[in-house]
Image (cartoon, helix red, strand yellow):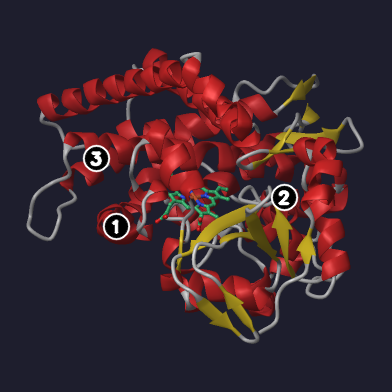
Amino acid sequence: MKDFPTVSWYQVLKNRKSILKNPLPFHHYNFEKLGDTFKVKIGPSGTILFTRSPEYIRRVLQKQHKSYHKSTLQTRDLAKYIGKGLLTSNGEHWRTHRRMVQPAFHKKKLEGLLGIMHAAIVEELERIKPDEVQNIYPLMGDLAFQVVAKSLFSRDDIQGQMAQLKEISETNQKMLIREMRQPFMNWWFKLSGEIKRHLSYSEQARTILDGIIQERIDSGTEKDDLLDMLLKARYDDGTPMSRAQLIDEVLILFTAGHETTANALSFTLFLLAKNPDAQQNAFESISQVDLEGDNPMETLSKLTYVKQCVEEGMRLYPPAYYVDRVSIERDQWGNHSIPKDTMILLAMYELHRDIRFWNAPEEFRPERFDAANKKDFQEYYYPFGAGPRMCVGNNFAMYEMTLVVAEILKKHEIKAVTDNVEINPLITLKPKEVVLKFVPRKKGEPV
Ligand code: HEM
């Protein structure tokens, strides 16, 4: 039985400062030196298995997914702040709720949400300051949050509560990152009451959501939005979700759906700014499309090249740059035996830039995603994961991001101000800031 090469604890300690700042170069170095799958010692006894092997990634996510669960990073650490729902559970609990939540994200259902989504996007984009240099990342964060909020609740009059919810979600995420990055400080976080304080913020978030849900029920109205769909979802025995479970699922949609989208959008806008030819192509491709058309699904179907720009953006900067799993039983993969309880990180960032599978992987080339080429890279491209736990909001996110980029390009030319974007790999792959200038396009400007 072949063992995997191992990066020693000493190497980790020696590089700890750069790993804390950005672990990706350290991992890249190890992949190049040791091959597609290797172990990293993370203490005297613990190890993590890193892989960028397309074969093993497919095995873990699809072929042999039953042997791999989500790790406690999500099912315990994240769950303590946002509850036990789709993103943060395993086994039967997850399966039951996936069956209930998934229909709300069905293409046909989403069609009904496109109007709400589009209106929220247009409203948020009014905050772009023409001709001024601005960091677009916070605006994309607000936009993505508002799109989830309005798709859930179809309300404009709860801005205060939504702002509070966003604040809590971000504060708690910061706390979680501290806990993950400094596990040796966890005794202090507990003793000092910090964790308790953050748990009380989560309680405040739940109270806010409870109030909004109660108002919907009391109003007796049907809105056909995400909340209505979750309220109508039934277990096999015909009963609805408990209030606590419903709140967990709502909190999870906010958590899973807003930062990922904001990251992908911000990186894509930067890449378009740095690649004026692709930007011009994208602009030309939409110049004849009426984004305000009566049939939003038909409008979206005309935005193919813009969609490809977003796909290419997520290839270079996948928000879920690592997907974590733990083996729940021994797995035999070729010559390798993966013992039970092995922590595994699937390195999507590496795979998406692997020169063996992508021509000129560092370049932004939306043409790669032409329909004719799609099957060529299916096994090397996982922005939304794969298999039964694939992102439930993937269509929602693609519709949203395509509309945002199209709306921006229609009205503005995007100019880069900096050479690069500094990345900030935390739970998701974030940019530190994305500084851009938006120059308004003149009406009637020739294409
Ligand atoms: C660019 C945007 C997005 C990206 C890149 C993204 C990526 C992902 C990935 C990679 C997973 C699978 C994680 C794993 O297998 O461990 C996932 C799961 C999930 N995503 Fe997304 N996501 C995005 C947007 C959204 C949106 C907009 C929503 C909802 C409004 C959403 C809701 C979820 C949920 C609930 C799960 C858990 C599904 C399950 O385990 O059954 N995501 N997402």
Label 2 and label 1: CA atoms lie apart by 29 Å
Amino acid at dot 3: Gln
| Residue closer to the observer: 391 or 96 | 96
Amino acid at dot 2: Tyr
- Name the residue that disc number 2 marks: 317
Mark linked to residue 103 = 1
Q: Is mark 2 within 8 Å of ligand 1?
A: no
Instruction: Provide residue 322's location: percent of width, then percent of height.
Output: 63, 54
Q: Nearer the viewer, mark 1 or mark 3?
A: 3
Q: Upstream in the sequence, badge 2 or badge 1?
A: 1
Instruction: Provide residue 212's location: percent of width, then percent of height.
Output: 25, 23
* Residues packed near mark 1 inside 10 Å, few (<14), some (14 to 19) or many (20 plus): some
Instruction: Provide residue 107's location: percent of width, then percent of height.
Output: 38, 59
Amino acid at dot 1: Pro
Quarter the N terminus occupies: bottom right
| Residue closer to the observer: 137 or 408 | 137
